Structures are given as C-alpha cells and as structure tokens.
Image (cartoon, helix red, strand yellow):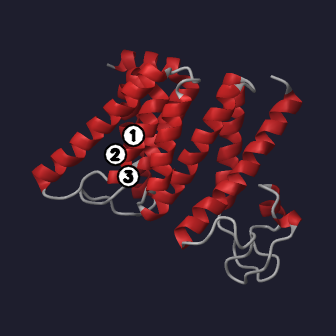
Amino acid sequence: MDNCLAMFVFILGTCLGSFYNVCIVRYLKGESVFWPGSHCPVCKHRLSWWENIPLLSFLLLRGKCSRCKAKISWLYPCVELIAGILTLALYWKFGMGLEFFLYTILFGILIVASFIDLQSFILPDRLTLSGGILALGFSFWLPVGPKMGFLGAGSGFLVFWSIQKGYKWLKGQEGLGGGDVKLMIMLGAMVGLSGLPVLIFASAVFALLGSVFFWLQGKTIQAKTPIPYGPFLSLAAILYVLAGDVALDLFHKIL
C-alpha cells in the first residue's frame, strides 16, 4: 500500500465524513443540506475555513465554538474518523478501482442512516430506498454479482418483512421498524444471498453487545425498551464487505 496515497484516501474519507455530519444534523433539524453554510448551532457564527478542517478543527478549537464557546458535539469527529477509517479500509481491500468508489457511496449512506437512527429511531426512506436502488444497480460491477445481489435483496426484505408482520400478529405491536425492513433491500444486495445468514447472525450479536453497553451506561434495558437496529445491521454488512471470507469461515465454525 502506497503510504502517501493511503494518507490521501484517509483525508478524503474524513472530508466525506464532514459532509455526512451535515446530512445527519440537518436532517434531524429539518434543514436544507446545502443552505445556509456551516455555522455554530448556538450562536449561528459562520465557520471560517480553518474551523471546517475534519478532525483537526475540533482539536484546534478544543471542542468549543470560537465565538460563544458552546461545546461542539463529539458526533462530528466520530463520524469523520469512522468515515476516514472505512474509506481507508476499502482502499486496502479493493485499491482505487471502481469497486472502491461504489462501496464508498454505499458506506456513506449507511453511516448517515445509522447515526440518524441512533438519535431518532428513524431510518429515512430517502436513504434506505435510494440506497437499495443503488446497491442493486451497483451489483453488476461488484463482487457479489447481480444474480446473488437481487436474490439477497429480495430474500432479506422478505425475511424481515415476515418477522415484522409475525411479531405484530403475535404481540399486537411493532417489534421491528419498517425502516429496517426496507434497509434489508440495500444490505441484501451488498452481501448477496450467501451472506444473509452471516449478516443476520452478526447483527443480532452486535445488537446484544449494544444493549449491554447501554446498560453499562446506566440506562435501564427492559424487554420493551426500543433499540435502533439499523446501525447493527449496517455494521454487519460493512464488516462482511471488508472481510466476507473470514466472516463466512467463522460463521461455519460457530455453527
């Protein structure tokens, strides 16, 4: 791996992460992604160029607005760092080919959708459905291939739709959000039919670990406590794309 190119890819990823932050925050506030420009949400101070440098600006500003000293949310550097790491991981896995660019787009959608879901328990249709269409189209150029991609998307949707309807019929209430069902079109197209069992199993494990984390943070976890499932599904899909062979081997050994 070329070190200079790797550094460029990581910086590119953090810049994308900065844009993802805009999408996340402004969706939650019901604001336009493109207008107005970047500003402090408290005092409305318009950010200068040096206050918009991914990761570095947060450190230079010590996590506070330069004008009103309001605290800057840790969401911003976290998303930028995650985007940088995942973009670098894609470069390590696929190089700078077409697959790298296509997966970068899909990973970006998953990052934005996951952080929106974590904060609002909502997976926007504009992300899940558009992501599903893109993933199905991209499958013609991705390792999964169109046949397995379409089968994975259809099967994933049907499995989660059946779980959603079955739980509601048995319990009389929603146990799985409609956004998670729609998200499975995108994720199924990304991992293919053979990757679905690994995806479902891994996401369940991640969700269980997430519940433990919430408990350790002092939040009561009860049987009816809602937990956003989209981020765990997305994490499982991302890891499968990056290490599918290892994941399949491990899955078969466990079972």
Return the disc, 3 or 1, that comes first in the chain's sequence.
3
Q: Which residue is mark 2?
A: 181
In three-dimensional space, the C-alpha distance between marks 1 and 2, rounded to whole angstroms, equals 5 Å
Percent x, y for residue 59?
80, 61
Q: Nearer the viewer, residue 146 or 17?
A: 146
Q: Secondary structure at mark 1?
A: helix
- Could you tell whether 196 is left or right of 238 in the image? left
Q: Secondary structure at mark 3?
A: helix
Q: Nearer the viewer, residue 128 or 88?
A: 128
Task: Determine contact: label 1, label 2, CB under 8 Å.
Answer: yes
Quadrant in the rendering for residue 122:
bottom left
Percent x, y for residue 120?
45, 64
Task: Determine contact: label 3, label 2, CB under 8 Å.
Answer: yes
**With respect to residue 41, does 101 lie above or below?**
above
Percent x, y for residue 168?
17, 52
Q: Which residue is mark 1?
A: 184
Q: Nearer the viewer, residue 22 or 115?
A: 22
- Could you tell whether 154 is left or right of 112 in the image? left
Characterize the local packing of mark 1: few (<14), some (14-19) or many (20 or more) Cα atoms within 10 angstroms.
many
Q: Which residue is mark 3?
A: 179
**With respect to residue 181, does 144 lie above or below?**
above
Query: In the rendered view of the protein, which quadrant contains the N terminus?
Result: top right
In three-dimensional space, the C-alpha distance between marks 3 and 2, rounded to whole angstroms, equals 5 Å
Q: Nearer the viewer, residue 131 or 174?
A: 131
Q: Amino acid at mark 1?
A: Met
Residue 17 in sight here: yes
Characterize the local packing of mark 2: few (<14), some (14-19) or many (20 or more) Cα atoms within 10 angstroms.
many
